[in-house]
Amino acid sequence: MKTRLLLIFTLLITLAGCTHNNGDIGSWFGTWHIESITNPDGNDAAYNGSAFMQFQSTVVCLRAVDGLHNERADYGRWEEVDNTLTITLPDPNVAYDRVLQTLPGGPEFSAEQTAFHFTITARTTTTRSLQIPDAAGKQWTLFLKKQ
């Protein structure tokens, strides 16, 4: 009888597991490398390939690494609705690294900007193209690849 109860208990714990959304972790889950950036003129920006977006559940980490392997990171929330990826960072009065605002060769944003709305223009299971307007309203394209 004890063996049967232990078996049933173990089975219930196993079935409960740690999954959310019926195990669907979504197509964004994981690390995405910002491989290149195209400026509004259609030319490759002077971007050095040093930034990453890391997605998990509703949390995003924006990470940049310099040539000396020093890291800067911001954490915020993200959601995708109708082909728009929105990343929301903390209050600008809170100290954070402003990775998106300081991408070398990338778009210029206001230092106070906390919400970034990317239009998803292309997607496969391992690549994404995102467009975002800079502070002047000009469209930049970011090309991401799943790591």
Image: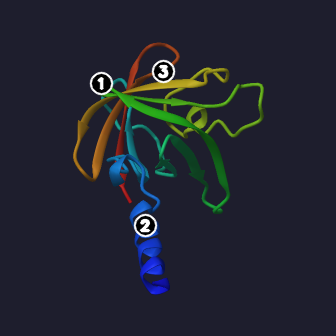
Q: Is residue 7 above or below residue 33?
A: below
The three-letter amino acid code for the residue at tag 2 is Leu
Q: Which residue is mark 3?
A: 134
CB atoms of marks 3 and 2 within 8 Å: no
| Dot placed on the residue nearer the N-terminal end, 3 or 2 | 2
The three-letter amino acid code for the residue at tag 1 is Asp
Of badges 1 and 3, the one in the foreground is 1
Q: Nearer the viewer, residue 63 or 44?
A: 63
Q: Which residue is mark 2?
A: 12
The image quadrant where one finds the N terminus is bottom left
**Dot 3: what SS?**
loop
Pointer 1 local density, CA inside 10 Å: few below 14, some 14–19, many at least 20: few
Residue at image location 49% in from the left, 13% down from the top: 136
| Dot placed on the residue nearer the N-terminal end, 1 or 3 | 1
The three-letter amino acid code for the residue at tag 3 is Asp
Residue at image location 43% in from the left, 66% down from the top: 12
Q: Is residue 128 above or below residue 139?
A: below
